[in-house]
Image (cartoon, helix red, strand yellow):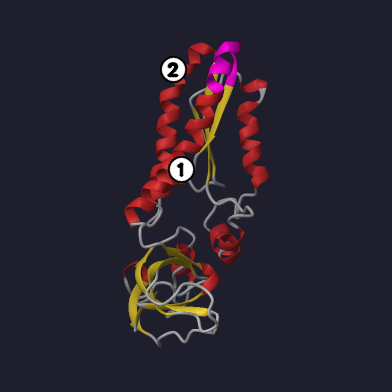
Amino acid sequence: MQAIVVDPGAPQRLGFQAVQPPAPQASEALIRVRAISLNRGEIVYRVQGTAGTRLGWDLAGVVEQAAADGSGPARGARVVGVLPTGAWAEQAAAPADALAELTPHVSFWEQYQDIILRTLAGVYVPARAVVPLMAERKHGSLIAVSSTLARAPYTGSGALAAGKASVEALLKALVPELGPHGIRVNVVAPWAVETEASARYIQARKEAISQSLPLRRVAQPEDIAAAILLLAMPQAGYLTGNYLAAGGGNYLP
């Protein structure tokens, strides 16, 4: 079996190497990997890892052997998943509870489209509801949460990056439209934030992500709330059309 490993003598310090096929535990499924992605935090391991280190967090593929304990997707299911390491290979053993199955009627395009539309709707729908009330008062502030992914995407982040970019385009159009009504429009753009939803993903690679950031730590929800408060406070009454990157220094506009 071939896998992508750290190779100090190869371009970009990455190369193919024959490795032993995975031996799944009872709670793991054997996946035939069809697609992988490169996350920004993994670059640290590529640079710092010793020769032969296997890399890779995210994968998409087909279950060749279901978990022996009966958990998780069945053989033949199309899945996406996250591993602590070793996803960049022809096969990977993945914990069943770290896999999400793609239902037969959902194509990769439909999933891609759904992410984009849900991301945009999460801003458009509430904005449409509150803007008339703000215009009536001749005062208001719209602050959308985007992501630095919209301007500095990594391989595999296309759907979310496109969704967040559409949010920024919408807000950019609203700046001149709502300004005459006394409504300010701004964007806060985080990157990696440790929340309840992202905790498992972040914890598995927290050190790598932290080392890739100038501030050397992953953001907490309070950090992003503070950035939003900065733009919402009365003292920011003349700020509109601004983009505030809150990614710990991962992107400089």
2 with respect to 213 (left or right): left
Looking at the magenta stretch, what is its main secondary structure?
Answer: helix
Q: Residue at x 53, y 34 (%)?
A: 144
Q: Secondary structure at mark 2?
A: helix
Q: Is residue 54 above or below residue 82?
A: below
* Disc number placed over residue 118 in the picture, else none: 1
The magenta segment: 130-140
Splitting the image into 4 quarters, where does residue 209 fall? bottom right
**81 or 157, which lies in front?**
81
Q: Secondary structure at mark 1?
A: helix
Circle 2 crowding by C-alpha within 10 Å: few under 14, some 14–19, many from 20: few
Are circles 2 and 1 on residues that touch, CB within 8 Å? no
Provide the residue designation for mark 2: 177
Q: Residue 218, position in %: x, y?
A: 60, 54
| Type of amino acid under label 1 | Arg
Q: Residue at x 44, y 34 (%)?
A: 168
Q: Counting residues from the N terminus, which is met first, the one under dot 2 or under dot 1?
A: 1
Q: Is residue 210 visible?
A: yes
